[in-house]
Amino acid sequence: MAPQRMLVRIMYSALLFALHFQDTTALTKNPHCQNKCGNLTITYPFGIGEKCYLAERYAVTCNHSTNSAYLDFFESQVFNISESDLLIDAFPVLDLEFNKSSGENPGPLEVSSGPYFIFPTARNKLVVVACDAYAYIVDSKTRNLVTGCATFCNRPDIVPPSSSNSSCAGIHCCQTSIPKDISDFTIQVHSMNTDQKSWASDNCNAYFIADKDFNGFDKSTNFSNCAKDRIFSDTVPVILEWAVGNTSCKNASRTKGYACRENSDCVEAAGGGAYRCGCKRGYKGNPYIKQGCKGNA
Ligand SMILES: *[C@@H]1O[C@H](CO)[C@@H](O)[C@H](O)[C@H]1NC(C)=O
Ligand SMILES: *[C@@H]1O[C@H](CO)[C@@H](O)[C@H](O)[C@H]1NC(C)=O
Ligand SMILES: *[C@@H]1O[C@H](CO)[C@@H](O)[C@H](O)[C@H]1NC(C)=O
Ligand SMILES: *[C@@H]1O[C@H](CO)[C@@H](O)[C@H](O)[C@H]1NC(C)=O
Ligand SMILES: *[C@@H]1O[C@H](CO)[C@@H](O)[C@H](O)[C@H]1NC(C)=O
Ligand SMILES: *[C@@H]1O[C@H](CO)[C@@H](O)[C@H](O)[C@H]1NC(C)=O
Ligand SMILES: *[C@@H]1O[C@H](CO)[C@@H](O)[C@H](O)[C@H]1NC(C)=O
Ligand SMILES: *[C@@H]1O[C@H](CO)[C@@H](O)[C@H](O)[C@H]1NC(C)=O
């Protein structure tokens, strides 16, 4: 099994593992919880330190020397936590290893959302760095083609690399947005023979899903002769949507572990397979804390 497949499995098996954690709703939030790590505000259900988070999967570790925050669950740095999303450095940069004789890439790669951390794919994009290759995403449920892009390897005597301001616009690199949210999908990457099988000699191959605003390469990135590990780190930032329960609002409200407190409403996530909470109209605050939603007096 290729290491890339392992990585994605590990990432998502961690999500499945989370199912075994019980929601500890009886837990009262310690008033001494630190809620800042650098300039990042950590709000409950996320928290730093024991009794500061709702469940293990929301545990954050702050490195005080670098002021960087890590979500323990993914063992990844988290850049932003909002009411519904995380911006987290967690998507593995995947190797593209074309078979030198057939040109086949041993795909497809399967990616699926977990119940508590959901892939809002429409806020992320597909990026492929390769020579003469095309890539596409298929919705695993409907089998529909969702998006795709192609990357060509020009010969510098024909198209100078500096002809485009964007360094990922179809020459040596392509990227495409994902038009809708899909929870389970496969990524396929294939070689094509437009420039004397240039995929065979190129060693600057990688692909990944990243936050739409990810701009890891700049105009100075030279894709013409690079080793993958010189332009990429192991992971890239992605947006994940978080949820507090693994069932619909209707089902959740009947359970003991229902997380939405006074003056809050349940908000469906992941197409009804998960939920979050939000303060009712006219109230502000934290819907996961007792008396957390306060009226605007
Ligand atoms: C949801 O989580 C509970 C425990 O929190 C678990 O018992 C249950 O199996 C989970 N349900 C699904 C559909 O994953
Ligand atoms: C925190 O500060 C850094 C650098 O000062 C900045 O790049 C980052 O966007 C800030 N993060 C947030 C969540 O404001
Ligand atoms: C914090 O980050 C620094 C620099 O990356 C590292 O050397 C140190 O071990 C980290 N501290 C903890 C507690 O992880
Ligand atoms: C963090 O998320 C909030 C809410 O979505 C957003 O307004 C803010 O711009 C984000 N900050 C960064 C640095 O991404
Ligand atoms: C590469 O492709 C050739 C021809 O299709 C095949 O015989 C060979 O087993 C493939 N090699 C690998 C490592 O998959
Ligand atoms: C390309 O870059 C040049 C110089 O930085 C700038 O003047 C020009 O507006 C840019 N073009 C586009 C389409 O962004
Ligand atoms: C990019 O790398 C190739 C191969 O090493 C080299 O020939 C070319 O001059 C480089 N381009 C730039 C703009 O540095
Ligand atoms: C809600 O509960 C019903 C009945 O127990 C069950 O059939 C359904 O799958 C549940 N929905 C979710 C999203 O867990």
Image (cartoon, rainbow, N blue to C red):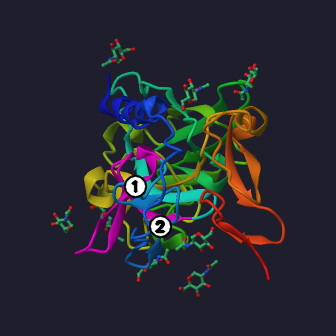
Q: Secondary structure at mark 2?
A: loop
CA gap between label 2 and label 1 equals 14 Å
**Is 76 included in the stretch rendered in magenta?**
yes
* Label 1: how many Cα within 10 Å (few below 14, some 14–19, many 20+): some
Q: Is 53 or 262 nearer to us in this picture?
A: 262
Residue 134 locus on image (x, y percent): 56, 39
Would residue 3 be visible to someone looking at this image? Answer: yes
The label shown at residue 220 is none
Q: Secondary structure at mark 1?
A: loop
* Label 2: how many Cα within 10 Å (few below 14, some 14–19, many 20+): many
- Write down the residue under mark 2: 42
- In the rendered image, the residue lying farthest to the right is 281
**Relative height, residue 290 to residue 219 (above, below):** above
**Is 176 included in the stretch rendered in magenta?**
no
Quadrant in which the N terminus appears: top left
- Write down the residue under mark 1: 51
**Quarter of the picture for ligand 2?**
bottom left
Give the image quarter of residue 97.
Answer: top left
Magenta residues (range): 55-81
Quadrant in which the C terminus appears: bottom right
Query: Amino acid under label 2?
Result: Ile
* Residue positioned 46% across, 35% down in the render: 15
